[in-house]
Amino acid sequence: MSDQDAARAALVQGLQDDIAREYQAIIQYVIFSQKLDKAQYMNIADQLVEHAHQELNHALAIARQLDYLGAYPVHTPKTVEVSEDNEKMLWADLRAEDNTIKNYRERIRQADALGEVALAEVLRGIVKEEQDHQIDLATALGVTHDDRIRKEKEPK
Ligand SMILES: [Fe+2]
Ligand SMILES: [Fe+2]
């Protein structure tokens, strides 16, 4: 396998992981948007409904890119985290967004390195929305949105 082929295979595998994370996000947002019940979180609950729609759009966009690259999209979500506790739900979503953003940044570097400019552009549009999700969740929790500089720790 040439270096180019190996890089392309790694990109496709990364996108498969990305779409599995999108499925996970859809499920968590569908459930948590309805299960948040503290009065102070009603605003973020409404935002989670919007997130759910956007995650579905991301999954569709990644599926289209996988198809373009000749790959069949996976159908299994990454492990869905559930809780009855309001703060635990929001932290689970925030951690997932942190991880998603880190992965999309890496995917953009991979796509750019391969000259996949259209894919890189699609990914840049997605990561912009993921950063908005991260801000919404961090704001609701009263913590720093950028996990690279966040000092606040998730309560045990
Ligand atoms: Fe997403
Ligand atoms: Fe998101």
Image (spheres, grey):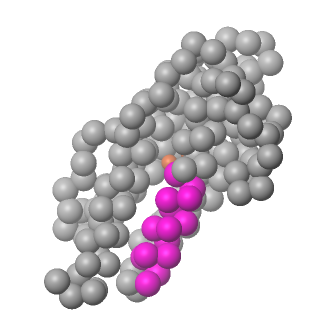
Question: Which of 134/52 is in front?
Answer: 134
From this view, report whether residue 83 is shown above or below residue 103.
above
At a point 57% along the width and 56% down the height, the residue shown is 101
Q: Quadrant of the N terminus?
A: bottom left
Q: Is residue 16 left or right of residue 27?
A: left
- Residue at 50 percent across and 76 percent down: it is 109
Q: Main secondary structure of the magenta part?
A: helix
- In the shown orientation, is residue 137 left or right of residue 32? right
Compared to residue 113, the image places residue 55 above or below, namely above
Q: At 73% across and 12% down in the image, what residue appears?
A: 38
Residue 142 in the image, given as x and y percentages of width and height = 82, 35
Quarter where residue 11 is shown = bottom left
Residue 2: x percent and y percent? 21, 88
Image position of 149 (left or right of 114): right
Q: Residue 77: x percent and y percent? A: 34, 38
Residue at the farthest front position:
156
The residue positioned 25% from the left and 42% from the top of the image is 75
Quarter assignment of residue 114 = bottom left
The C terminus: image quadrant: top right
Residue 5 drawn at (x, y percent): 23, 81
Please count the marks in the image: 0
Q: Any magenta on residue 112?
A: yes
- Can residue 77 be seen in the rendering of this structure? yes
Q: Nearer the viewer, residue 95 or 58?
A: 95
Magenta range: 100-113
Q: Is residue 25 magenta?
A: no
- Is any part of residue 46 visible from this angle? no
